[in-house]
């Protein structure tokens, strides 16, 4: 989950590399480094901590050179310190790496026997050593090719060589790598977002590819050393969306954008003149779908759990939701009459991508739901549905989660209609309700101050629970995840009816408990479960659209969401939970956009 960048230019590159690394910090931020070539030597500088620390070092000791590589790290092998920070360099080569080299211990032993020594605990340093060794006997292309052949695992690499003063090398297997084109300069980066300030013309390496970047050209090679051509894509200009503006942090901005992004997504998929959903050409005829499998990780998995309820409610299709890191290793019986849907914000989530690869190898029908249309999952899936949320920089997902749920909901309604499992009148009504959703979200967002009242209840809490039934249950799980991610407080989302089967033992006097209780068919049952919590001293925060008088004087706080049809309640219920996690984290002085130990784009297992 690290971020890498490389630039070859006709001018000094260190400032541009620092700028790109700042945009890549969402991928990792426990150490940073840069290497350039100047005065016929590799100039490596690195440090623990954020890119700001590296920038201060470079201010004191500038790193000259018209080509270079940079790195921000999310630690896997070795603690986050200066020695383990990337780049890793010898006298002749310097390397930055995103991913994991799974046979690094074996390779380390092999090259120690050859007389090489290692300075760091990282898996990456073996790449530096192998390249250094092959350079003694091979030309550049063979050196790169033979090095890549020895590596097992996933990687995106940026490499510079002391004796090739006009060249940056990029390579990819498993981890994403983009190539950008400029005037008398070219770039590599972990994603297009890092390169957008420098270019809007991008190509993407596929697994096994490597490239040679010169100022005036880029050469691409496949895993067999055969020269290949790459399509050049032009990126849309969304730079303004990726800036904080007047907001304190990206997360508060992204929460606030949810009314806008929801409206944008609805407009992309809805023909309002006909009240019709514009989703066509699915890879499988909806009438012939035997089963739907939803596959994702983390927050995206919670959107899949939500979709499972909607599929069961609106179709007769059998459905399962799977965690990608489990699905990819299970002996799943894949069926050509099933539709496999993969959900990922970045479109680069390693486990989700690997699960998709597994399905592609078995020739089953696949669909990707992503926020990045140029991503690996988008390019590999048979069919892709973008969520149109715009760049999401905060590590804890907010607007992308709503976007994932929204696209899944639209897809399910469309499938239901194509299968004639929803009558036309109800279909039109649900679409009309959907058109009103951005306004309901806006109303909910306007009540942020209401949730700040109870945030203090959580600051010193040992833990908390989020309870919900039916559509509210996946949202309870997502709310608990948000609190864990942002404030480092233990929280669990439970099906409210399961409380008496164990979790009720955790309730003690004063413990804050969030109860999601919209006025749906589960309402009375949820209220009964809430009373069980209150009877044992729990301090209940109730989130509901019910406008009746409070059912118990012992409810600590009641947050009101607008009234809509029950299938849309999840979109509104999750917003106060985002606010709650955000304000608890603020009170605890946690880093909102960059929670400890986490990164945005999970490109390792």
Image: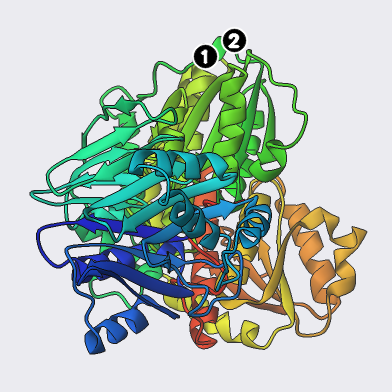
**Where is 370 relative to 496, above or below?**
above
Tag 2 secondary structure: helix
User: Is any part of residue 579 visible from this angle?
Assistant: yes
Tag 1 secondary structure: loop
For the residues bearing labels 2 and 1, Cβ distance under 8 angstroms: yes
Q: Using the rendered view, name the quadrant where residue 295 is placed.
A: top right
Query: For mark 2, what is the residue?
Result: 288
Q: Using the rendered view, name the quadrant where residue 559 is placed.
A: bottom right
Residue 288 in the image: x percent, y percent?
59, 10
Viewer-proximal residue, 299 or 50? 50
> Label 2 neighbourhood size at 10 Å, few (<14), some (14-19), many (20+)?
few
Q: Using the rendered view, name the quadrant where residue 372 is placed.
A: top left
Please report the residue visible at 68 percent of the width from the left and 52 percent of the height from the top. Answer: 473
Residue 167 in the image: x percent, y percent?
24, 51
Front disc: 2 or 1: 1
Please say which color scheme the image uses: rainbow
């Amino acid at each position: 989950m690290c971020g890498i960048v490389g630039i070859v230019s006709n001018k000094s590159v260190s400032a541009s590399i620092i700028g790109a690394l700042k945009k890549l910090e969402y991928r990792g931020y426990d150490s940073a480094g840069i290497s350039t070539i100047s005065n016929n030597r590799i100039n490596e500088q690195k440090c623990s901590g954020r890119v700001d620390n590296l920038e201060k070092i470079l201010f004191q000791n500038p790193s000259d050179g018209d080509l270079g590589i940079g790195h921000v790290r999310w630690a896997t092998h070795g603690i986050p310190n200066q020695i383990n920070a990337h780049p890793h360099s010898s006298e002749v080569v310097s390397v930055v790496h995103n991913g994991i080299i799974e046979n690094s211990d074996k390779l380390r032993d092999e090259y120690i026997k050859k007389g090489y020594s290692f300075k760091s605990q990282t898996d990456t340093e073996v790449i530096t050593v192998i390249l250094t060794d092959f350079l003694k006997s091979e030309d550049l292309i063979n050196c790169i090719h033979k090095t890549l052949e020895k590596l097992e695992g996933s990687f995106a690499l940026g490499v510079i060589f002391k004796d090739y003063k006009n060249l940056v090398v990029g390579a990819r297997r498993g981890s994403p790598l983009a190539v950008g084109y400029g005037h008398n300069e070219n770039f590599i980066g972990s994603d297009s977002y890092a390169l957008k300030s420098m270019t809007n013309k991008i190509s993407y390496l596929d697994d096994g590819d490597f490239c040679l970047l010169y100022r005036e050209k880029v050469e691409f090679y496949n895993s067999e050393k055969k020269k290949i051509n790459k399509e050049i894509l032009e990126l849309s200009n969304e730079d303004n969306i990726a800036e904080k503006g007047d907001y304190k942090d990206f997360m508060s901005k992204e929460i606030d954008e949810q009314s806008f992004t929801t409206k944008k997504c609805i407009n992309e998929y809805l023909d309002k003149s006909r009240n019709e959903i514009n989703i066509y050409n699915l890879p499988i005829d909806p009438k012939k779908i035997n089963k739907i499998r939803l596959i994702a990780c983390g927050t995206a998995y919670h959107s899949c759990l939500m979709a499972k309820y909607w599929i069961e409610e609106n179709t007769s299709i059998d459905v399962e939701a799977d965690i990608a890191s489990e699905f990819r290793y299970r002996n799943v019986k894949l069926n050509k009459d099933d539709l496999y849907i993969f959900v990922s914000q970045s479109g680069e989530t390693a486990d989700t991508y690997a699960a998709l690869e597994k399905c592609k190898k078995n020739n089953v029908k696949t669909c990707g739901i992503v926020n990045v249309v140029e991503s690996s999952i988008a390019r590999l899936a048979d069919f892709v549905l973008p969520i149109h949320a715009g760049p999401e920089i905060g590590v804890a997902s907010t607007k992308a989660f709503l976007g994932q749920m929204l696209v899944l909901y639209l897809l399910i309604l469309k499938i239901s209609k194509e299968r004639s499992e929803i009558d036309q009148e109800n279909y039109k009504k649900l679409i009309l309700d959907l058109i009103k959703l951005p306004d309901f979200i806006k109303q909910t967002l306007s009540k942020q101050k209401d949730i700040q009242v109870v945030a203090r209840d959580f600051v010193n809490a040992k833990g908390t629970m989020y309870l919900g039934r039916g559509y509210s249950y996946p949202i309870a799980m997502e709310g608990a995840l948000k609190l864990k991610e942002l404030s480092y407080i233990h929280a669990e989302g439970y099906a409210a009816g399961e409380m008496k089967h164990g979790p009720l033992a955790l309730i003690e006097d004063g413990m804050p408990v969030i109860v999601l209780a919209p006025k749906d068919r589960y309402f009375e049952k949820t209220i009964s479960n809430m009373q069980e919590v209150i009877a044992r001293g729990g301090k209940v925060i109730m989130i509901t659209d019910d406008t009746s008088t409070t059912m118990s004087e012992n409810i600590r706080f009641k947050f009101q969401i607008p009234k809509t049809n029950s299938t849309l309640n999840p979109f509104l219920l999750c917003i106060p939970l985002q606010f709650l996690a955000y304000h608890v984290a603020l009170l605890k002085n946690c880093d909102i956009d960059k929670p400890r130990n986490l990164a945005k784009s999970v490109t390792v297992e």
